[in-house]
């Protein structure tokens, strides 16, 4: 399903581009982040300027060349926590950052406002 997900993301980007949007960002969570990574590691449309990746369990972002927010909770899933250091080391693009929200789980339960603030701050910094 991952190649199909990348195709669907590309179609969504094309749809928004046809509507006149010139600066897009992808905000995704968990498996959605893994699917977004497939799209972004290929040849993403240049209107996609940044990616907020929440709760992803992969070990690196090396193939993605745009600014990334790697956001997770300190009580996240074991795979997310185990690979946090490797993901942080692979953040190469300017304005990329890793943020851990204290006392929250994979779904940011009870800390939704902090999650939204972290994503909004990142998007405001990368979509100029």
Image: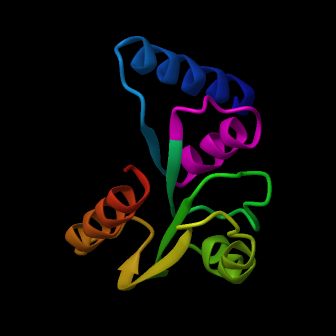
Relative to 37, 95 lies left or right: left
Coloring basis for residues: rainbow
Residue lying at 38% horizontally and 62% vertically, measured from the top left: 125
Front residue of 71/74: it is: 71
Q: Nearer the viewer, residue 126 or 112?
A: 126
Q: Total label count?
A: 0
Residue 76 visible? no
Q: Position of residue 33 (x, y in %)?
A: 57, 50
- Residue 35, magenta (yes or no): yes
Classify 32 as above or below 23.
below
Q: Residue furthest front?
A: 128
Q: Relative to 6, does residue 84 appear above or below in the rendering?
A: below
As for residue 33 lying within the magenta part, the answer is yes
Where residue 28 sits: x, y (%)? 47, 48
Give the extent of the magenta segment: 29-48
Q: Position of residue 39 (x, y in %)?
A: 67, 35
Q: Is residue 106 above or below residue 20?
A: below
Residue displayed at 70% across by 72% down = 87
In the image, 46 versus 101, the foreground residue is 46
Q: Residue at x 67, y 46 (%)?
A: 37
> Which quadrant of the figure contains the N terminus?
top right
State the image coordinates of residue 76 (x, y, percent, origin top left).
Answer: 50, 76
Q: Is residue 68 among what the camera can see?
A: yes
């Amino acid at each position: 399903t991952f190649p199909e997900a990348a195709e669907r993301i590309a179609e969504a980007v094309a749809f928004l581009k046809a509507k006149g949007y010139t600066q897009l960002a992808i905000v995704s969570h968990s498996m959605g982040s893994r699917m977004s990574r497939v799209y972004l590691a290929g040849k993403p449309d240049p209107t996609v300027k940044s990616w907020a990746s929440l709760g992803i369990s992969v070990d690196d972002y090396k193939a993605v060349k745009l600014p990334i927010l790697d956001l997770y909770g300190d009580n996240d899933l074991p795979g997310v926590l185990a690979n946090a250091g490797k993901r942080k080391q692979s953040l190469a693009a300017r304005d990329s950052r890793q943020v851990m929200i204290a006392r929250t789980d994979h779904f940011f339960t009870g800390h939704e406002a902090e999650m939204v603030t972290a994503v909004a701050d990142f998007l405001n910094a990368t979509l100029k």
